[in-house]
Image (cartoon, grey):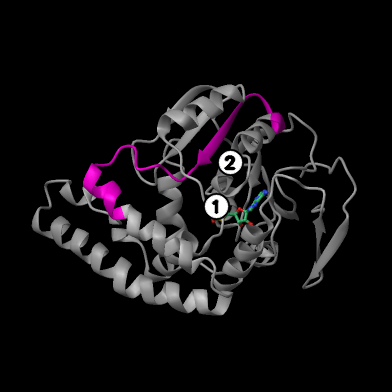
């Protein structure tokens, strides 16, 4: 592990373990409603099967090569949520410091309890309690589009990387690689989100579960049917929600809540993400051509 460079503000006790907390009201690059919403979300969805983690993990980390990480790598996971990607990566690296400002740290601590090379810390991206240039690899998956200042968050991640280290980021795409028809379909979903995210948590979970059944499942089933009818073509991949063809219903429920229930959400084009990475000092930006869009890896 890497020694904290500031003192914790607090400790959270869990099953005899102590999780150091560094969150403070002075943190500015944070949307508290979003953090609270995620804290509740990750309490609702705190466990994932090894199979679920492996299938989605292989997709997020498809562009991460053994030259970027290895048995000696010190890794930072920013916005770890349940810690599922830290758990996915743990066997390939030396140590993972996983941070999140929400109460998700409790779920993360439980999910990663068997991994001695993962430490969970309650902290946001604003004040990451480790010295600059301490990490060989930093990743942040599905996090920085939920922050008021995404560019600043990318810069904070860059600061923690050693020179030559790599950063893996996943940000929601602005559908910039999709057809006009596909983009128009997104409009009613966006309007739905504007209503759903304002509901109280319990009702939000019920509504998102219903939407998972009446919206996600039929569209995914159509994509699966096209895959079945035309196995040699990749037409199904152009269908909305085709990403979920090989995902469990638990993942679909979780993502329904994630996509429709989160207060602050921004979307970026591939070009915008590349610009933000380069502005933060990254070079050699490589985008995955596969879903989820967009995830990219870059070198400091
Ligand atoms: C969509 S979840 C993704 C969690 C995890 N990376 C995953 O993919 O399973 C977004 C996470 O970002 C965290 N988050 C929100 N604001 C943050 C901030 N200012 N700094 C770091 N993480 C933050 C939330 O608490 C939440 O757990």
* Mark 1: C-beta under 8 Å from nearest atom of ligand 1: yes
| Residue shown at 53% from the left, 52% from the top | 88
Front residue of 117/82: it is: 82
Q: Residues within 10 Å of mark 2 (few under 14, many from 20)?
A: many
Is residue 192 magenta-colored?
Answer: no
Residue 156's place in the image compared with 109, above or below, is: above
- Kindly report the distance in space between the C-alpha atoms of the residues bearing marks 1 and 2: 9 Å
Front residue of 45/23: it is: 23
Which is nearer the N-term, disc 1 or disc 2? 1
Left or right, 217 with respect to 10, comes to left
The quadrant the C terminus occupies is top right
Q: Position of residue 101 (x, y in %)?
A: 71, 55
Q: Position of residue 5 (x, y in %)?
A: 86, 40
Q: Would you say the residues marked 1 and 2 are in contact, meaning their CB atoms lie under 8 Å apart?
A: yes
Q: Which mark, residue 85?
A: 1
Looking at the rendering, the stretch of residues picked out in magenta corresponds to 159-185
Q: Which mark, residue 106?
A: none
Is residue 182 magenta-colored?
Answer: yes
Is residue 282 among what the camera can see? no
Left or right, 168 with respect to 211, comes to right
Q: Quadrant of residue 29?
A: top right
Secondary structure beneath dot 2 equals strand
The quadrant the N terminus occupies is top right
Count every numbered label the image shows and give the total: 2
Residue 206's place in the image compared with 227, above or below, is: below
Residue pointed to by mark 2: 139
Left or right, 25 with respect to 96, comes to right
Is residue 99 among what the camera can see? yes
| Residue shown at 43% from the left, 72% from the top | 208
Front residue of 95/6: it is: 6
């Amino acid at each position: 592990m890497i020694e904290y460079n500031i003192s914790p503000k607090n400790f959270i006790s869990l099953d005899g373990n102590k999780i150091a907390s560094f969150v403070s009201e002075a943190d500015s690059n944070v949307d508290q409603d979003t953090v609270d919403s995620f804290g509740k979300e990750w309490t609702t969805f705190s466990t994932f099967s090894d199979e679920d983690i492996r299938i989605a993990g292989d997709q997020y980390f498809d562009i991460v090569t053994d030259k970027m990480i290895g048995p000696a790598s010190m890794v930072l996971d920013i916005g770890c949520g349940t810690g599922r990607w830290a758990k996915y990566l743990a066997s390939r690296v030396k140590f993972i410091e996983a941070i999140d400002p929400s109460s998700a740290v409790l779920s993360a601590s439980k999910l990663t309890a068997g991994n001695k090379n993962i430490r969970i810390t309650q902290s946001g991206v604003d004040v990451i309690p480790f010295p600059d240039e301490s990490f060989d690899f930093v990743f942040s998956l599905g996090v920085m589009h939920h922050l008021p200042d995404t560019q600043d968050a990318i810069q904070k991640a860059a600061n923690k990387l050693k020179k030559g280290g790599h950063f893996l980021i996943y940000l929601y795409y602005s559908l910039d690689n999709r057809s006009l028809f596909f983009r128009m379909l997104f409009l009613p979903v966006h309007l739905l989100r504007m209503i759903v995210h304002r509901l109280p948590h319990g009702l939000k979970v019920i509504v998102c579960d219903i939407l998972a059944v009446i919206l996600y499942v039929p569209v995914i089933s159509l994509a699966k049917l096209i895959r079945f009818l035309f196995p040699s073509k990749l037409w199904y991949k152009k269908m909305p929600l085709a990403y979920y063809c090989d995902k469990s219903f638990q993942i679909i429920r979780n993502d329904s809540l994630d996509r429709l229930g989160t207060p602050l959400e921004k979307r970026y084009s591939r070009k915008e993400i590349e610009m933000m990475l380069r502005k933060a000092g990254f070079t050699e930006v490589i985008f995955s051509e596969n879903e989820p869009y967009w995830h990219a890896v870059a070198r400091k």
